[in-house]
Image (spheres, rainbow, N blue to C red):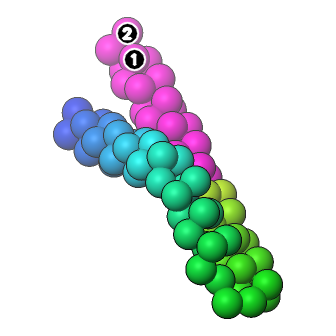
Amino acid sequence: MKKSELLQTYYSFVIWVCGALLYSSVNPILSDLIIYYSPSKLIKYLLMFLLFCLLFFILFKVGRKCVILHNMIKHQSYIKK
């Protein structure tokens, strides 16, 4: 395993973590806008569900990248021994 692969995975992980932090800071604003401007309950619940799905997707990707990065670092430390 090359060090460049490890760095590329780390940078990808950092980008996803920053995206998760950005989403968590913007989510209350988006929720308020959806509640205030939704023309009907159906659209409001659909948009809230989409926000929840987006949150779940981002957290899933961050967790997956974290596990991949952890395994790569563990594998890298075994190679050095």
Contact? badges 2 and 1 (CB < 8 Å): yes
**Number of numbered callouts drawn:** 2
Report how far apart the C-alphas of labels 2 and 1 lie in the structure. Answer: 7 Å
Query: What label does residue 77 carry, if any?
Result: 1
Range of residues picked out in magenta: 59-81
Q: Nearer the viewer, residue 6 or 75?
A: 6
* Amino acid under disc 2: Lys
Q: At 63% across and 73% down in the image, what residue appears?
A: 36
Residue at 39%, 17% in the rendered image? 77
The circle on residue 81 is 2
Secondary structure beneath disc 1? helix
Left or right: 5 in relation to 60: left
Q: Does 41 appear above or below 74?
A: below
Residue at the (51%, 37%) spot, across then down: 66
77 in magenta: yes
Residue 62 in picture, x, y percent from top left: 52, 46
